[in-house]
């Protein structure tokens, strides 16, 4: 059973930066794709950024130019570098990995952007 554990969330002022990490219990190279999602209070969970096994990335329009997703296969870790954070980025951020038809989720990490 694959486990994903997020870390790196916290409280940051508008304009600040955070880097989220998602550590996998096994090789992330076996995932077909991985991604970061977020869910704000009262809203549906949404895709923030994704990366394929081959390295192709995609981003939500709201974070393009500010967030960068990357994966380190040697460390079995997925990252999300978040710059120029805005209050509307406040949410619980989740890591997801997909293998064929199976999806694996982490427990989430809270990101709060506030002055």
Image: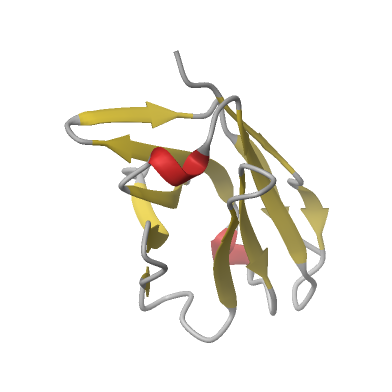
Q: Is residue 36 above or below residue 95?
A: below
Q: Visible in this render: residue 41? A: no
Tag count = 0
Q: Quadrant of the N terminus?
A: top left
Q: Quadrant of the C terminus?
A: bottom right
Q: Position of residue 35 (x, y in %)?
A: 42, 51
Q: Is residue 99 above or below residue 85?
A: above
Q: Is residue 112 above or below residue 70?
A: above
Q: Position of residue 36 (x, y in %)?
A: 47, 51
Q: Is residue 62 above or below residue 112?
A: below
Task: Name the one closer to the observer, 78 or 11.
Answer: 78
Q: Residue at x 37, y 41 (%)?
A: 31
Q: Is residue 24 left or right of residue 61?
A: right
Q: Residue at x 67, y 66 (%)?
A: 81
Q: Is residue 11 left or right of residue 46?
A: right
Task: Name the one closer to the observer, 88 or 107.
Answer: 107
Q: Residue at x 40, y 39 (%)?
A: 30
Q: Is residue 28 left or right of residue 23?
A: left
Q: Visible in this render: residue 46? A: yes
Q: Position of residue 26 (x, y in %)?
A: 55, 28
Q: Residue at x 42, y 68 (%)?
A: 55
Task: Name the one closer to the observer, 90 or 19.
Answer: 19
Q: Position of residue 98 (x, y in %)?
A: 31, 38
Task: Name the one closer to the observer, 77 or 73.
Answer: 73
Q: Is residue 30 left or right of residue 80?
A: left
Check the image and name the residue furthest to the bottom. Answer: 65
């Amino acid at each position: 059973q694959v486990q994903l554990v997020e870390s790196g969330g916290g409280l940051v002022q508008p304009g600040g930066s955070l880097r989220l990490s998602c550590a996998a219990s096994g090789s992330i190279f076996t995932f077909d794709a991985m991604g970061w999602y977020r869910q704000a209070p009262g809203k549906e969970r949404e895709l923030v950024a994704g990366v394929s096994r081959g390295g192709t990335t995609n981003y939500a329009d709201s974070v393009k130019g500010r967030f960068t997703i990357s994966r380190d296969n040697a460390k079995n870790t997925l990252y999300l570098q978040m710059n120029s954070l805005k209050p509307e980025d406040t949410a619980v951020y989740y890591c997801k990995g997909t293998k064929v038809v199976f999806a694996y989720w982490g427990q989430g990490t809270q990101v709060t952007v506030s002055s």
